[in-house]
Amino acid sequence: MTPVELSRTVLCAVRRAVDAGELSVAVPARAVVAAPGPGGSGDYATNIALQLARPAGCPPLYVAEVLRERISAAPGVRGVEITGPGFLNISLDSAAPAAFVREILAQGLRYGHSDALAGQVLSLRLPAEYEARADAVADAVVRIVATQAGRVHVHRGTGEQGEREQQKVFLDLRTLPPAPRDPTPLGPDAARWALLHPAPHDRPRIGAEHLVQRESNPLFRVRYAYARTRALCRNAADLGFTAHPGDPTDVPAARTVLSLLADHPRLLLGAATHRAPDRLARHLVTLADATLAFLPTVLPLGDEKPSAAHRARLALVEAAGTVLAGGLSLLGIDAPEHL
């Protein structure tokens, strides 16, 4: 079961509880499922019971109990636990990770794309004169919004947009703190990262820290993590085995990577909805760090023979590399296979 399918399962549970008269509440348009927080358990968690408690006029724990029974009975769900004030922690059966990884590998660089913003048009305004940061953000926003089937019209300067433009979602990039100096000497990739990684209200730093190949450089970690995923695939081929999706959760680090990959569609939609490439950049850093921590478990050690577990871990590595490469591409940054 994929995160999207699990979200639909949660909504179906709400709908059935409403139809049965156990809850009196409007069924929400979506249910957020994400990695469990501190104190949580299982593969995913949702706060849907907390979300519905007030409009339903019931304690969150009561709503959680009602939904737990229905979610637990859904195909692909191994069990549901309630933690804290009413969080539902959902454990999936062992086939779920394999199906999820297979989905990412099948979709490739389009994993996380959707039609959530279909029909929406963003009117984006740039300064009258070229400004490195505003133009870089505009280019990234166009790419990211397109992943959700939205469209962007870019205008430079003030200009007269007319009545039609007044009806479009408006974003004024003239208010962004500009780059303190020309980032061109950093090279195209480091320059774009320096301009896109900071939050919108922060002034970007244009310095040699974006070029150093050390752990202190977030861009290096992201690109290095992707390059290492490709290297591991080559190493595995040399050892005579290839990736095959399975359940890699015998390794704790794999669960972290799976959770972050599952969260990628939500992060990508959020970056598109809020016109915020920095959200995607920070997500890539988090995924890269988790992937680097997981990589040492992938290949057999010593005289150990490749097993189904190794093939499953390698498939997860390929999936993580796919998402890292896709995210960098949306930011306009190259993903090198050798670094």
Image (cartoon, rainbow, N blue to C red):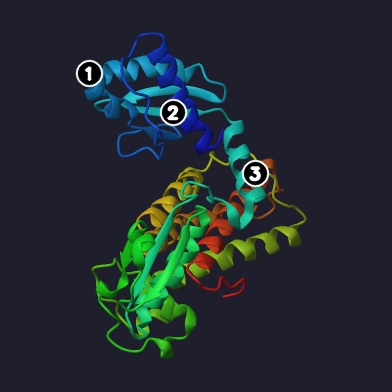
| Residue nearest the observer in this picture, 114 or 1 | 114
The local crowd at label 2, few if under 14, some if 14 to 19, many if 20 or more residues have their Cα within 10 Å, is: many
The local crowd at label 1, few if under 14, some if 14 to 19, many if 20 or more residues have their Cα within 10 Å, is: some
Q: Earlier in the sequence, mark 3 or mark 1?
A: 1
The x, y position of residue 7, in whole percent, is 46, 32
| Residue nearest the observer in this picture, 38 or 19 | 19
3D distance between C-alphas at marks 2 and 1? 20 Å
Q: Amino acid at mark 2?
A: Ile
Residue at 38 percent across and 71 percent down: it is 196
The local crowd at label 3, few if under 14, some if 14 to 19, many if 20 or more residues have their Cα within 10 Å, is: some
Q: Amino acid at mark 1?
A: Pro
Q: Quarter holding the C terminus?
A: bottom right
Say which residue label 3 marks.
102
Residue at 44 percent across and 20 percent down: it is 13
Farthest residue to the front: give it: 163
Q: Is residue 204 above or below residue 26?
A: below
Judged left or right of residue 201, residue 318 is right
Q: Quadrant of residue 30?
A: top left
Of badges 3 and 1, the one in the foreground is 1
Q: Quarter holding the N terminus?
A: top right
Tell me, for residue 59, which label it has, or none.
1
The x, y position of residue 9, in whole percent, is 49, 26
3D distance between C-alphas at marks 3 and 1? 39 Å
Q: Earlier in the sequence, mark 2 or mark 3?
A: 2
Q: Secondary structure at mark 2?
A: strand
Q: Amino acid at mark 3?
A: Arg
Q: Is residue 190 above or below residue 3?
A: below
Q: Secondary structure at mark 3?
A: helix
Q: Are marks 2 and 3 in contact (CB under 8 Å)?
A: no
Tell me, for residue 90, which label it has, or none.
2
